[in-house]
Image: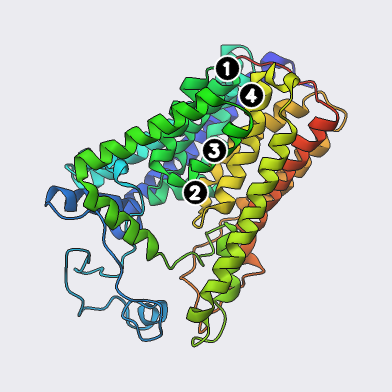
Amino acid sequence: MLPSRTFRIVLGFFGLILLILMGCRYWEAGQATTAYPPSSDFYKFYLSGERLAKGQSIYWVIPPRIQVGDPCHPDALRESGQPNTLHDGPLRLGGKLPCLAPNLNPPFFMVLIAPLATLDYAQAWWAWSVLSMGCLAFSLWLMSGVLVHNRASRMMLSTTALGLLMAYHPVYINFVLGQVGTLLLLPLTLSWLALRQGKALRAGAWLGLATGLKPFLLIFLLPLLLTRQWRASAAMLVTLLGTAVTGWLWLGSETYVHYQLVASHVTWTTSNWNGSIVGFVDRAFSGQDPAVWPSAKWVAKALGMTLSAAVVWLMCWALRRGVTPAAHATPGHMADQVFMLTLPASVLVSPLGWLYYLPWLLICSVVLWQWSSGQPDGRAWRLAWSAALLATLAPIEMKSVPTPKHPTEWWGIDAMYAYSLLSAFLVMLLLVLRDLRKPMTRPTGSH
């Protein structure tokens, strides 16, 4: 085995070379993305900013696309491209891309986007991308402090991890699409570390901010209440209310009406990049006869909600079993349990649990690595976790929304992200239950 100093030097050098190589790849991808703005989801955010500057609603509704023959039906787009007979309106995008999916982020999200919309698109995209990658890099620096103790080892570990993660497909997709997964990893990491250190108010505030940007993270309130984290729960709710009030005072109540309207018109849960339970079920039902599928949507919705509720119940049941005086004596232990279960569960039960939220599982990886360190069965747990995430390594391309004419392989490759998320949740669930039966000795790391 290499001496520790030599090992650090070699690994740090490897991480630096990998960062340079991946940086070149990301630069080329950024050039291609900015050359054709509609290829990025950030384009939708940018359009919302432009519409806001013109006094228009930041949201728009896609024209009909459910029934065969609808102007924006996936089959029509495959055969004829974007229709050119649809006109602008208060809640219609119109223009060259009338069927472009809308910005689904809440009004508070415009606090981040409005300043960028004043820039040229390419400048705005690169500024957003640098911010997102900076959040990823800082999150890795914070996480590495849990596993190692000195600055040199921490720098080596975080640098190498950043290079490896830039080669990870969900991180790359975050960058290319200009999505929010890597950006929101930072407040989630800060919340986890604060809760570990017993700083409940700070932990709740960071969670409230993250939830204000992605409302499905409201699921975190359940484990906080179940583990009797009253101050963190209150701070989360107050911060979340603050984000809602900010959006309301700035954009008005009508914007929230439009937001609800847009959310109710989502029809693309069947995408193969959606790893949620709802997405898995909808893909199974979407292959039916065109005359049956619209009327059978309520069956898919009921089944998806039932299975999602089962995941939430398992999460709450496991956490409730862990609420003991001994657990309350160690805030870090309870914080780990909350995050290791809630992070995969939140993406699983969200109707749109896209692959670009998978980098959040880095927190679970750090917890599992630390919990299993020095344990007789530690290698088995790490192998199980690696196997659960193995499917997410494959660079699976996004397919058009499936239809009966172009069905999906809902049980096969198109469900890989759902299988991976479910496996990750089950590994975390079993690890928590195992720890309740036979507590693991967790080494403490610097935070």
Three-letter amino acid code at the position of disc 4: Val
Q: In this rendering, is residue 88 above or below 257?
A: below
Report helix, strand or loop for mark 2: helix
- The residue positioned 58% from the left and 16% from the top of the image is 197
- In which quadrant of the rendered view does residue 205 lie? top left
Three-letter amino acid code at the position of disc 1: Gly
Distance between mark 1 and mark 2 Cα atoms: 30 Å
Distance between mark 1 and mark 4 Cα atoms: 37 Å
Out of 398 and 166, give the one closest to the viewer.
Answer: 398
Give the image location of residue 337, x and y in percent: 67, 32
- The residue positioned 51% from the left and 46% from the top of the image is 357
Give the image location of residue 41, x and y in percent: 36, 54
Q: Is residue 290 left or right of residue 409?
A: left
Residue named by callout 3: 220
Q: Is residue 43 left or right of residue 377?
A: left
Question: Are dots 1 and 3 in contact, CB under 8 Å?
Answer: no
Residue named by callout 4: 10
Numbered badge on residue 198 = 1
Near mark 4 (Cα within 10 A), the count class, few <14, some 14-19 or many ≥20, is: some
Report helix, strand or loop for mark 4: helix
Residue at the left extreme? 54
Near mark 2 (Cα within 10 A), the count class, few <14, some 14-19 or many ≥20, is: many
Which label sits in the foreground, 4 or 2?
2
First along the sequence among labels 2 and 3: 3
